[in-house]
Every structure is written in C-alpha cells, then in structure tokens.
Image (tube, helix red, strand yellow):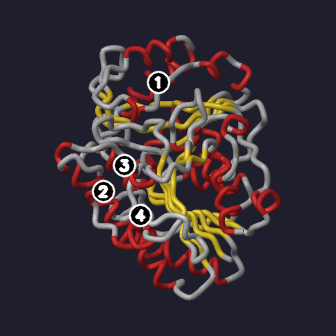
Amino acid sequence: MKLLFLIADGMGDWPVKELGGKTPLEAAHTPHMDQLAKSCVAGLIRTVPTGMAPGSDVANMSLVGFDPAKYHTGRGPIEAAAQGLTLDPNDLVWRLNLVSVTSPDETGTMLDYSSGHIGTAQSTPLIEDLQSQLGDDDFEFIPGIQYRHLLVHKGGANQPEAELAIRPPHDITDQAMDQDITAYAQSPRMKALFDAAAKRLGRPDNGTKANAIWPWGQGRPLILPDFADTYGMKGAVISAVDLVKGLGRASGMEVIDIPGATGLLDTNYQGKVDAALDFLSSGGDYVYLHVEAPDECGHSGIVADKVKAIDQFDEHIVGPLIEALAGEDVAFMITCDHFTPLIERTHTTDPVPFLISHPSCTMHGLPAFSEANAAGTGVMVEHGHEALKYTLEVLS
C-alpha cells in the first residue's frame, strides 16, 4: 500500500460572517475531498502540544510523526536543516524575515511580515549585502527563499540571545512592535545588528518594501530520528517552504524540489502532483505533500483568497492524484497543520480536521469534509505526532 499525506497548511478556520456563517472549507468547492468523505475514517488531530506555540514548525513536525515536545528546538534550526547547513551543536540559528515596518524602532508597527511577498530574486541580493556589510565572526546572514532567510549566531546557544522572546512577525501584523524591540535591546549585539540592518535596507537603491530584518524562532541545530527506521517506509516531502523540507531532510526523507513552487496561489500544483506520482512509481511508499497557500491567505485576511486556495487544493492536488492512482492500493490522509482563522490572521491551537480514505475505511460517511463534520465523529487523535501511527493502524 502507498500512503499520501496531503496537507493544506492553515486550511482550518472559524465561521466567517461574509460567508454566511460558513468556514472557508465549508464554502469552498471541494468535490474530491467531499467524495472521499462519504466513506472514510475522520476526526480531529491535536497537532500542537499543550504549552507550545501553534506554529507551522511545531504542527508539521507533529504530522510528520515526531513529538515537538521532544525534538523541537526552534523554527530557524528546521529551515537550516532544509539547506543542509553544517552547524556546531552550540550554534544558535534564527529564522530571519525581511519585513515592512512603519519605523524600525519601539514606535513602529509591523506592516507586512513578508515585505509584500518579496521574490527570491529581489531578497537574495539584500541578504548578501547584509552579510557583506554586517556579517562577522559571530553572525552570518544566509539567503533562503522569498522573505524567509536565516541568521546563524556562532556559539550563541550558550549566550543570553538564546532566551530572547521575539514574536513571529506574522502574529503581529498591524500591531505595535515595542515589546519585541525591547526584547532585542536586552542583547546589545542583537539590537545593534537590527539597527544596522535597517540602515542598510533604508538606502535609496533598495527598490523593495523590505526595510527591516526580523530574527525570531532561534534554537540549537535540529536532530530527528530516521523516518524509514521509525516507520518502515521510504518517504518524501514535497513543499515550497523550507520548514517542511527541513523536517524531511533532518529525518532522512527524500526532499523533492519543485520548480515554480511559490507557497502562494500561483504555485506549481501540477509539478507537485507529478513529483508525487514519480516517487511512488519508483519505489516510494509515502509522500508528505504540503501546500502553503491557504495559510498565506489566512494571514492576509482576504476571505475570497482563502476560499480560492482551498478550491485549488481540491481541484489541482486532490482530484488529479485520485484520478491518477485509481485502481491502485493507495490511501489518502487529508488534513491541515493548524487553523489560520481569517479574523485572527495568525495560527491557533484548535484541533484540525482529518480524513483517511481507502477502500477499507468505511467507519464514517460524511456529507462533506469540514471542521464540524470531522468533529462530529467523536474521534480525537490527542497527540499529533501519533497521527501517522494512527493512520497506519487504521489501514492495517
């Protein structure tokens, strides 16, 4: 049997007034997921352990099959794993966003955690310039993708900077930054770096919206168990975002890069489907296929865009895979990593809906796949890192 985990990042939501009290998932046109829901095993998964922040890093680590309470060290280390960086165990790795702010000081407001979804071609020269001008024996700026980059503080895991409490920038859109600037200031080195970077980005020849850096999610390098040894399957991850790639690479799975995978509504859906099919046909057992667009649209707060993102996930990912694999011994697990409610514009800890589809899965017959219908089955996978194990048990 082959197994596909299809993840629509941030798809879960709360009822929306503009949608007549429906959630975006309920309002979206999802005939393929709804068809699978008619005979399935469905319920909810608590992907975020009690006391941990509901980030995509924590939630996806759970769904990949590893306990964040045991293995999670920070967002930055996961993305460093995606790049295959060689790090010392005492290095401190920060996720670094290029952001747009009203003013890069304690009076400022966070305008955009993504600098207008800056493209990689525009962001890489900015990071390279920061490294050239500000990098030294302690700090190294490392280019990533779009607005997502890294800052490595060599030997910093044993320094006070490891304890700085900086909020994720996507959690504070249109909010004051004073508490975060105060936190940076607890480290004279970090505050000096923040200020110097804002000065470099403020030069007239910067034609982008990025006018500040935002280091956050710091931690020691990530170490995960081997996926194949743990679950007895040859696995692959397919995603546009480094955190999912990092989870795959750190656990020894194949990481498949898709040209044109953007993490947005215009991502290369067909490329992801083709890559999944190629991997399964060449001896692979398990694919973790991740689509970022619903989450990005949740952060934007634009109702129509989030509905469209879910429409496209169903039309361009779920539907083509069902069609291509018809008649084969294949099971589907469809879920999301966390809720990204439009009204909140950030993540919440709500347990997420899931369905498992295979000819042997007939426990539940739902009229459609939705948060409420999944909750109505009464099934709860209380520990998210056991969701893969639970799926395998259902299918055994």
Closer to the camera in the image, 177 or 211: 177
Residue 71 shows up from this direction = yes
| Picture residue at 28% right of the left edge, 28% below the top | 174
The answer to whether 378 appears left or right of 385 in the picture is left
The quadrant in which the C terminus is found is bottom right
Q: Which mark is residue 296?
A: 3
Q: Which mark is residue 194?
A: 1
Q: Which residue is mark 2?
A: 26
> Which tag, 3 or 2, sits closer to the chain's start?
2
Closer to the camera in the image, 192 or 331: 331
Tell me where residue 383 sits by quadrant: top right
Q: Which residue is mark 4?
A: 366
What number of labels is visible? 4
Q: Position of residue 140 (x, y in %)?
A: 61, 36
**Disc 1: CA contacts within 10 A as few (<14), some (14-19) or many (>=20):** many
Task: Say what secondary structure mark 3 lies in.
Answer: helix
The alpha-carbon separation of the residues under discs 3 and 2 comes to 18 Å
> Which tag, 1 or 4, sits closer to the chain's start?
1
Q: Amino acid at mark 3?
A: Glu
Q: Position of residue 266 (x, y in %)?
A: 34, 64
The alpha-carbon separation of the residues under discs 4 and 2 comes to 13 Å
Q: Position of residue 296 (x, y in %)?
A: 37, 49
